[in-house]
Image (cartoon, grey):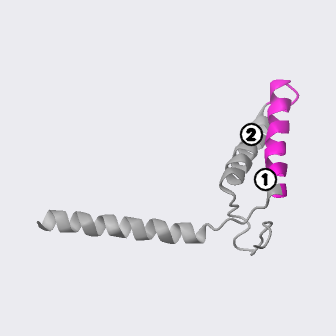
């Protein structure tokens, strides 16, 4: 019985923690911002596959491209948060 109750309490704490994190991650990217980020990632991919860029530049730009695509999919940029920036239209 104690194990069941502690498991239930743990489950409730995990859910409330997840809810708090989701409140922090409000969408702060507009559609233009997302399009620019995906376009940047596409250009980096094209430059890579045409052997225009190589070496360390590929690693740096590839990492940036992956981050930009991921942030555009979730519509949240963590770097905008401390500065209070939002490119999303007001509702």
Q: Is residue 34 magenta?
A: yes
Measuring 85% from the left and 50% from the top, which residue is drawn there?
36
Picture layout, residue 74 above or below residue 7: above
Disc 2, SS: helix
Q: Is residue 47 left or right of residue 82?
A: right
Picture layout, residue 17 above or below residue 49: below
Q: Position of residue 62 (x, y in %)?
A: 74, 39
In the image, which residues are magenta?
32-54
Nearer the observer, disc 1 or disc 2?
Answer: 1
Q: Which mark is residue 61?
A: none
Measuring 42% from the left and 71% from the top, which residue is drawn there?
16
Measuring 17% from the left and 63% from the top, which residue is drawn there?
4
Picture layout, residue 23 above or below residue 76: below
Disc 1, SS: helix
Q: Where, by quadrant of the figure, is residue 53 drawn?
A: top right
Q: Quadrant of the N terminus?
A: bottom left
């Amino acid at each position: 019985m104690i194990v069941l109750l502690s498991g239930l309490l743990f489950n409730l704490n995990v859910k409330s923690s997840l809810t708090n994190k989701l409140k922090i991650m409000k969408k702060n990217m507009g559609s233009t911002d997302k399009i620019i980020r995906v376009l940047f990632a596409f250009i980096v991919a094209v430059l890579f596959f045409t052997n225009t860029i190589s070496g360390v530049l590929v690693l740096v730009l590839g990492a940036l491209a992956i981050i930009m695509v991921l942030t555009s999919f979730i519509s949240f940029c963590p770097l905008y948060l401390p500065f209070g920036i939002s490119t999303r239209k007001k509702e």
